[in-house]
Image (cartoon, helix red, strand yellow):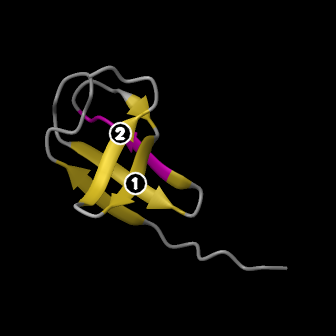
Amino acid sequence: MTEVNATSRDYTLPEGCPVCAADLPVRVTAAGPSAVCRHCGWLGRPLITVTHRGLRVSYDGAQA
């Protein structure tokens, strides 16, 4: 049986909430990232992609 590292990392994305543009706390675990906006209550799973310019954060179903 493979043991999964149970540690998590917490980050804050400045103005990262797609609903109200408040700072968005994101927790990244082995299951993937999840976020809950403390200002408006938006709940989602950001998609984090590594690019040549750094990290790109997007949201499923979000319109730009």
Crowdedness near tag 2: few (<14), some (14–19) or many (≥20) residues, C-alpha within 10 Å:
some
Residue in view at x 26 percent, y 24 percent: 40
Q: Position of residue 34 (x, y in %)?
A: 45, 46
- Of residues 48 and 22, the one drawn nearer to the viewer in this rendering: 48
Check if residue 36 falls in the magenta segment: yes
Q: Is residue 12 above or below residue 7?
A: above
Residue in view at x 26 percent, y 35 percent: 38
Give residue 17's mark. none
**Residue numbers of the magenta segment:** 33-38
Residue that protrudes farthest toward the front in the picture: 52
Task: Provide the secondary structure element on which disc 1 rests.
Answer: strand
Check if residue 56 falls in the magenta segment: no
Q: Nearer the N terminus, badge 1 or badge 2?
A: 1
Displayed quadrant of residue 22: top left
Q: Disc 2 residue type? A: Ser
Q: Disc 1 residue type? A: Thr
- Of residues 47 and 26, the one drawn nearer to the viewer in this rendering: 47
Q: Which residue is mark 1?
A: 49
